[in-house]
Image: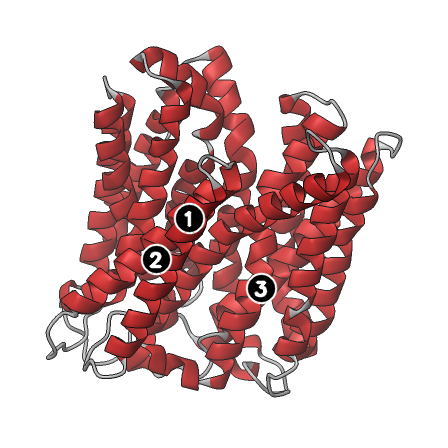
Amino acid sequence: MSDALAIPVKLAGPATRGAALMIAAALFMEQLDGTVLATALPGMARSFGVDPLHMNVALTSYLLSLAVFIPASGQAADRFGTRRVFRTAIALFTLGSVLCGVSQSLAMLVGSRVLQGIGGAMMMPVGRLVLLRTVPKAELVSAMTWVLVPGLVGPVIGPPLGGFFVTYLSWHWIFYINVPIGIAGFLLTGRYIVQLRETVRARFDFLGFALSGVCLATLMFGFELASRNAVPVWESCAMLGGGVLAGLAYVRHARHADNPVLDLRLMRVPSFAISVWAGSLTRITGGALPFLLPMMLQLGFGVTAARSGLITFSSAAGAMLMKAAAPVILRRWGFRATLMWNGALATLLLMSAALFRPGVPVTVIVAVMFAGGFFQSLQFTAYNTVAYADIPRARMSAATSFYTTFQQLMLSAGICAAAAALAGSMAVQGHDGPALSDFSVAWVVLGLITMAAVPVCGLLTRTAGDDMSGRR
């Protein structure tokens, strides 16, 4: 197949599902790897002979690498082709996983995690770009559900899976599990991922890449430090302030750049801008859930890590059930009504976790989390689809890079928001450690943030995305 396609290639039926499953597997690896490591850090510290506190750099190096390189993914796909970039991304991620598994020192582990992050930064935006350019609009909702579910499941099963490997095998298997998935993905890319390129005349935006990298890296690093109380508050604030200043410098640069690495002009497209703003508010909750719920169950209810992992997984089970229901719901009600009413319902289910107490039957907690996972997954599917309803094909690369950057940033901000709400409640109530009442405050705060997305969704037109949902 030619590297440059003069007309859009359309996939349908099995080809659509094959491409979507390929991209879903890549996203699963990426999202799983971001959380599976947490439970293994103490054992890895003993293996390397370092202080466990120093092991956090293994987490932050991956997040920083993602933040820096995601903005460049769209322009890389335009210049070198989607298939080539996607295959290279899988190869880098898999190679990084192997190197992580054989690491003999913390320094080698950090370098390997950076390599993983570079691969992960390219996989999801480029995979989403392939779907947007090749899948008929009428099939896009179904394709997006195939892609979204593994991304929701990965962060939820990461901690219990990591605990299983550390307990019964060794921490090395946390990374080796990616190898067969990566090899299969690399080999199948030629069959399911179409090679698409755009004619690129402008030079790569190196200054914008540097400014956006500094902005996103310092913001994500600041969020991560603040969530763990690893440094004094003023240092976290200084890091976040530096990220804001770098962001302002980028905004000034992007107004005059011919080919900015993050194109702010996309925010002039109403459906895209609304999805970015409302989706960002909702993803704060999505990022906080895998962090806050297990902590509440273990510290507040006194359940084991394994049991809390199983309870938390109920939200992922609800997300998987949504895959079949999302196209039907969106075809019947459309994006605007679904995002408003479903968003309110998903938020209320989330806030109901503030009422959980040890006396509440486990079946009730599981049922609420299952329903919450279902409706939250439907919300993300709708956001991820309607965002591109009015984006011209020539600007899809820029749109996927922009959207994925905000998505990753707000998921990280969610952990910080949950930690800040917990810390604030503890300070007000004079608690030395988090009590159930502090967790209740955190759930309510997160719910209020997410509920603010509902009126933003109301700004969509009633017919927004109808050609994607099939609504008449």
SS class of the residue under badge 2? helix
Q: Residue at x 74, y 22 (%)?
A: 302
Q: Earlier in the sequence, mark 1 or mark 3?
A: 1
Q: Residue at x 80, y 50 (%)?
A: 352
SS class of the residue under badge 1? helix
Residue found at the far right of this picture: 359
Total numbered circles: 3
Q: CA distance from mark 3 to mark 2?
A: 22 Å
Compared to 46, does 158 lie above or below? below
**Amino acid type, label 1:** Gly
Taking the image as drawn, is residue 349 in sight? yes
Where residue 36 sits: x, y (%)? 46, 31
**Camera-nearest residue between 259 and 299:** 299
**Amino acid type, label 3:** Leu
Tell me the residue that label 2 is attached to.
242
**Camera-nearest residue between 300 and 361:** 300
Q: Is residue 281 left or right of residue 55?
A: right
**Amino acid type, label 2:** Gly
Q: Residue at x 35, y 78 (%)?
A: 264
Q: Earlier in the sequence, mark 2 or mark 1?
A: 1
Where residue 366 sits: x, y (%)? 76, 39
Q: Quadrant of residue 193?
A: bottom left
Query: Which quadrant does the C terminus fall into?
Result: bottom right
Tell me the residue that label 3 is attached to.
281
Report the disc number at residue 222.
1
